[in-house]
Structure formats: structure tokens, C-alpha cells
Amino acid sequence: MSEKIGIVGMGLMGQAFIKHLRASQFRIQGFDVDPARMDQLAEMGGTPVDTPADAARDVDCVVASLPTSDIARQVIFGEGGMVEGAKDGMYILDTTTARPEDSEKTFAELKERGIRYMDSAVSGTSTMAQAGDLVVIAGGEAADFEACRHYFAGFSRAAYHMGPAGSGARTKLIINLILAGNRLAMAEGMVLGEKAGLEANNLLEVLKDGACASKTMTDKGPKMIDADYSKQGQVKISLKDSRLMMDMGQKLGAPTMMIQVYSQIMQAAYEKGYGEKDTVAFYEIMRGMAGLEEREGIDDVPFGKV
């Protein structure tokens, strides 16, 4: 008989998790504050439940996919939270891009309750998640990581144990910092090319074939060119992450020069009304700085700050 698993948070990432976990023969019970997401779970063969506690009831593992670590902690410890339904020894795999100190605190508090926790951040966009092209970066006990390998395999192509609790969150922030630098450099180069009169698609093909090539160019270059800001990530989430990166750098005494510039540009994008649009909508801010006309772009939500 297939194993039952819980999931809390069924947005873009959560929906992809459900798709692949179902394909891996897991039975799913899930909760989200958005009724439409609950309907989608039912359509995909899962069972919607009333609270996070219900999602954690009678399962060995719950996967959490939430916007911030503050929300994750509320969903775990708050009224109707996971701990109310969790049995002794249950695993919580928290894929939230979290503040590392929150992950450490959550691990310690859950351990006292007999619940096992891993900060299990994922690297990849929601589009990559749909394709099964995610990598899990986990922090927590090594034995728990080994015990959860089959869960990770249900929604990712690879999983890495990075060390004690908080290590997964720290690794995810470093990945996102480098990714932000790739996107910022590409946007700066593409705007410079446009100002120089170079044809954008031709320039992108050369960049992808040159020494500066990156996965970002393939995934995000066409979106910048076409002003396609339908969501794979979101400006508001990237802005939140950039602040976590700067906080981490400040606490550890490490330079964060690039991400400070990136954060300011993302702040401008948010204030211009791109909060719910794809992360690379900041390209319009870069174009505006160069005196180019702002494009409304392709979108999947009404334009305006949220």
C-alpha cells in the first residue's frame, strides 16, 4: 500500500511537489489558506483537510512550502498547527527559504517534543519544479536525512545533507545570492546591448554560447526580452530573500556588496508595482535607468503592488 504524506502550503512550488509525489505513489493530505489550492489538490487525487494539524495527523512526514519562516513557525506551532496533529517521531521537511536562526530554533523546539525537523530548502524555479528538476539542500540530523531520502526523491532529482539545522537555509541563501548576481549581470548586459543597437535575441544566443554562459540566460533571458513576467518566482519573495542574505552577511562579517545593489533594484521594482510579477520584472527598472520606455509586459495577475 502506498504511503500517506502531509503537505502544508500548495502554491506554485507546493503544486509541483504534489504532482511528483502523486506520481511516486504517495497519498497526500494537504492544507492551504487558499480554497482554490485545496480544490486543485482534490483534482490531483489528494485529500484537502481543514488545518495544518490535520495535514500532520496519522502520517510519518509533512512537507511545508511557505513564503517565510515566520509563517512556517506559525503553521507549525500556532493554533491548529502541525504539532497538534503530529505523532512522536514525525518528520517535518520545511522547504521554506528561511532565516537560518529560525530553522535552528524550530529544530530545537521540535526535538523537545519528539518531532524531527529538517530545513529542506529547494533550488530551482516553480517551472523547474514542475519538470522535476529541483535540488534539495537539507540541514538537520544525518540519520534523519537518510531516513527521508525517499521523500526527497519524490519531488526532487537530488538531495544534499549540508550539516546541522540551519545549514540548508544558509546554503539556499548562498545559491540565491549567486543566482541574483547572474540575473543582475545579464540584465545590465542586455540593457547595454539594447542601448548599443544590438538585436536582443541574437545577443542572447551569443551570450549563451560564450564564456559567460549560465543557466539563467536560458531560463530568464527570453523572459527579459519578451517582457514575459508571468510568475516562476516573485519580486516580493526575491526582495525578502535579499534581505536575509544581507542579514546573514552582517552577522558573519562577510561582504554582500552585489546583493545590496540588487536589493535596492528589487525594492524599486516592488514600489513600481511588480511585487507579484516574476523576479526578472526588475529588468524594467534597469531599462528605465537607461532611459528606455517601460513595457507593461505579459502577466498572470492584475498589475499593481500587493
Image (tube, rainbow, N blue to C red):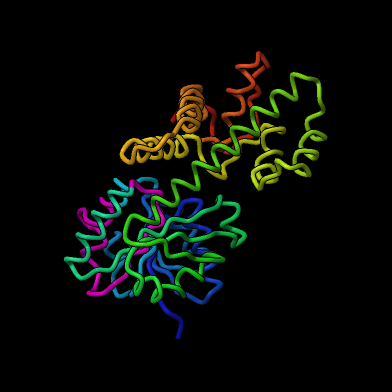
Q: Position of residue 240 (x, y in %)?
A: 41, 37
Q: Quadrant of the C terminus?
A: top left
The structure residue drawn at horizontal position 41% and vertical position 67%, both measured from the top left corner, is: 47
Give coordinates of residue 207: x percent, y percent.
75, 38
Residue 25 magenta-highlighted:
no
Q: Give the residue at x 75% y 25%.
A: 193
Residue segment shown in magenta: 73-99
| Image quadrant in which you'd find residue 243 | top left
- Residue in view at x 81 percent, y 20 percent: 197
Q: Which residue lies most toward the bottom here?
A: 1
Q: Position of residue 57 (x, y in %)?
A: 28, 71
Q: Nearer the viewer, residue 32 or 162?
A: 162
**Above or below for 254 versus 271:** below
Q: How many marks?
A: 0
Q: Position of residue 252 (x, y in %)?
A: 33, 41
Q: Nearer the viewer, residue 70 or 192?
A: 192
Vertical relation: 82 (above or below) 293: below
Quick check: 195 left or right of 71? right
Picture quarter with the N terminus:
bottom left
Residue at image x 60%, y 39%? Answer: 182
Q: Answer left or right for 264 relative to 294.
A: left
Q: Is residue 13 above or below residue 216?
A: below
Residue 76 position by quadrant: bottom left
112 horizontally vs 306: left or right: left
Identify the residue at the far left of this view.
112
